[in-house]
Image (cartoon, rainbow, N blue to C red):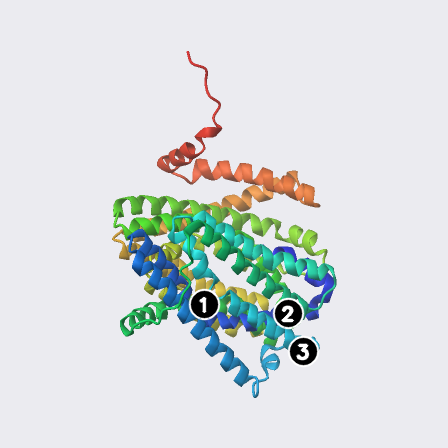
Amino acid sequence: MQQILLVPFFLRAWGIDLYNDWLLINAATTLLTIFDGGMQPYFSGLLQETKVRNEFAAYHRAVRIANFNYLTVIALVLAVIAAGSLWVPWLTLAGVDHMDFRQAYWTLGLLAANTLIAMPFGVANSIYRANGEYDRSVLMNLGNLAGQVAVPLVLLVLGQPSQILAAGMAGATLLSWAIIAVDQRARYGPLPWGLAVPTRAELKVTVSKCLYFASQPVSTWMTIQGPLLMLGHLSGSSETVAFNTARTLIGVSRQVTIQMSYPFGFELSVLLIRDELAALRRLLIDSVTMVGIVGGLLAGVTVVVAQPVVLLWLRGKVGIPDMLILTMALPIAVSASSQVYQVLLSFSNRPKLIAHGVGIFAVIGFSASLALVGPLGAEGVAIGLAVGEIVGMVMYLPAKTLEAIGMRGSHFHAVSILRAALAALLGYGVGRLVMLIVAPADYLRLFAFGALWAAVAGLGAYALLLNGEQRAVIARRFAFLRVPQPAK
């Protein structure tokens, strides 16, 4: 959503070349998230686990150890960056060549500062989840993201340069820290934000767990920001911007399924921690089915509506090839349900399978992208990432997760993929039919198209892709919409 709102303003204020440099600098500074080392998912899961089990002393100590670890890591990273700046040409490595040198260096430094300030935010925000207020953590996270959108948007409208945007984003992150500090103190009493040096035994457990979780920021960089730097060095500005724009548009569909997976994953993780395996299996089947169907529907309609939306959104300033849209949209159809497994494992502090799955995705995807970027450009990068995602996240992770919790996964997993693929065909077919009735030539017609498509595709998926038990679950959830019948 952040990029959806900001891309038109970036292009209008700076043009493609300066926006390309901003993307490359941002990709370079995001590399610093690797130094989180997996601490964010590990300590977030540990806080929830200790609080669910009413181990309050262990909970408070975990918070303080996390604080100590983050302060140590950030101090070391700053020292390395400061020393490296004496010899390393950071901007040249990032491929920046249009922005003024001084402006680019300030932008680089301030975006790096924003990344480091935000690094421990996830652990602090997970305190809400540990206290059973998952919805509150979502609200605070959305508030933080809203600041990262609103501040740059206002500054772009005012015609401010990149270093002012970077400074504003860092200020918005600091404000988010202040808000959750005040709110958590009001809700839970004195903040457990002291420092505790871990013992050798605690450090051993932390390192062993974080080594698995550390694969997530590394793989995320390799599959999200790495391709931008790859295109920046091996292709032109137009290819980089087209790739990022297409991924931003299609990422809306991916974000819908990711956000759906979080509440499911939270409930599943609590059941797993409590060893309530029968309830876990029932909920897992329903959640994977529903998320997969939604992902398939959205992937199908995205292929239909992407070009009209891009034309409305960017007014023809960026062209996106149809093949690029197709190769980015189709993996969503079959990989959406894998998010449920990933959240389940992450929230229950079981990182090993996640590390394997995302590691396979990152290594295969990045390698294939590097091999294909020369002959195929942005489309080659998208194809390479799709291959990696299918192998790591669609084939490996769900099968191994089901095996780990004692489910016979092959049949169930194959059926969930088939349903998602059928949902993609349904979303595409309904999209084509609705396009004949309401072509999204302006925003009003786009809204009408979306409403009509959602109604028809949603009812179709409800009738054709869900079994009787799943339809009954949905019917019970929406029972309040029924018109009460008069008593006879």
Observer-nearest of 279 and 49: 49
Image coordinates of residue 32 in percent, x first then y, are 50, 72
3 or 2: mark nearer the eye: 2
Instruction: Indicate which disc, 3 or 2, sits on the residue closer to the N terminus.
Output: 2
Residue 323 pos. (x, y %): 58, 60
Left of 27 or right of it: where is 193? Answer: left
Per the model, the C-alpha gap separating discs 1 and 2 is: 21 Å
**Residue 398: quarter of image:** bottom left
Q: Secondary structure at mark 3?
A: loop
Question: In terms of sequence position, does the residue under pointer 1 or pointer 2 come before the other?
Answer: 2
Find residue 130 and report its horizontal and vertical position in percent: 38, 53
Instruction: Give the number of the disc on residue 225.
Output: none
Q: Amino acid at mark 3?
A: Asp
Which tag is nearer the camera, tag 1 or tag 3?
Answer: 1
**Mark 1: amino acid:** Pro
Look at label 2 and name its amino acid.
Answer: Trp
Residue 217 tag number: 1
10 Å neighbourhood of mark 2: few (<14), some, or many (≥20)? many
Q: Quadrant of the C terminus?
A: top left
Q: Is residue 438 left or right of residue 486?
A: right
- Reply above or below: 24 against 177: below
Is label 1 in a helix, a strand or a loop? helix
Q: Does residue 376 appear in this view?
A: no
Residue that carries the numbered disc 2 in the rendered image? 22
